[in-house]
Image: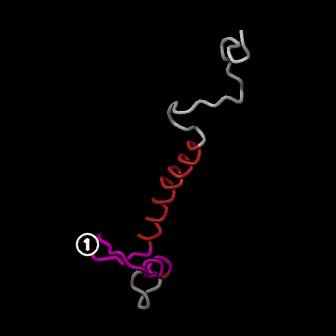
Amino acid sequence: MTAVDSGPLRRTSKTRRTGQGFALPALPGFLTVVVTVICLVPFLLVVEISFGQKIEGAAWDWAVTAENYRRFFVGAEWPEVTT
């Protein structure tokens, strides 16, 4: 036997497999992005709708106005009637 032909090769802990499927280090980052989007998008939609412009007949339009909050805190008929 020679030094080159020293028998079967053993895998050590430093040996790295390549091309063996999905890279696991990317999984936590991907899950973080997915959970953030799933939680953040509905929250932002609620905030946008709360500042949206109310249209009579239960509709609303994309806008930024504090009219909904004024109506909530001082009443719909303000300044004639304050509730």
Tell me the quarter of the picture where residue 26 sits.
top right
Question: Within 10 angstroms of label 1, few (less than 14), some, or many (20 or more) residues?
Answer: few
User: Where residue 61 sits in the image (x, y, percent)?
Assistant: 32, 75
Residue at 50% x, 32% y is 21
Q: Quadrant of residue 59?
A: bottom left
Looking at this view, name the residue that lies furthest to the left: 57
Please tell me whether mark 1 sits on a helix, a strand or a loop: loop
Q: Is residue 30 above or below residue 18?
A: below
Image mark count: 1
Asked if residue 18 lies in the magenta stretch, the reply is no
Q: Position of residue 9 (x, y in %)?
A: 66, 17
Magenta region, residue range:
51-73
Would you name the residue on which mark 1 appears? 57
Establish if 68 lies above or below 80. Answer: above
Relative to the observer, which residue lies in front, 57 or 75?
57
Question: Height in image: 34 above or below 2?
Answer: below
Question: Which residue is situated farthest in the bottom direction here?
Answer: 79
Give the x, y percent position of residue 54: 34, 76
Left/right of residue 55 with respect to residue 79 in the rendered view? left
Q: Residue furthest top?
A: 1
Identify which residue is drawn at 52% across, 50% down.
Answer: 35
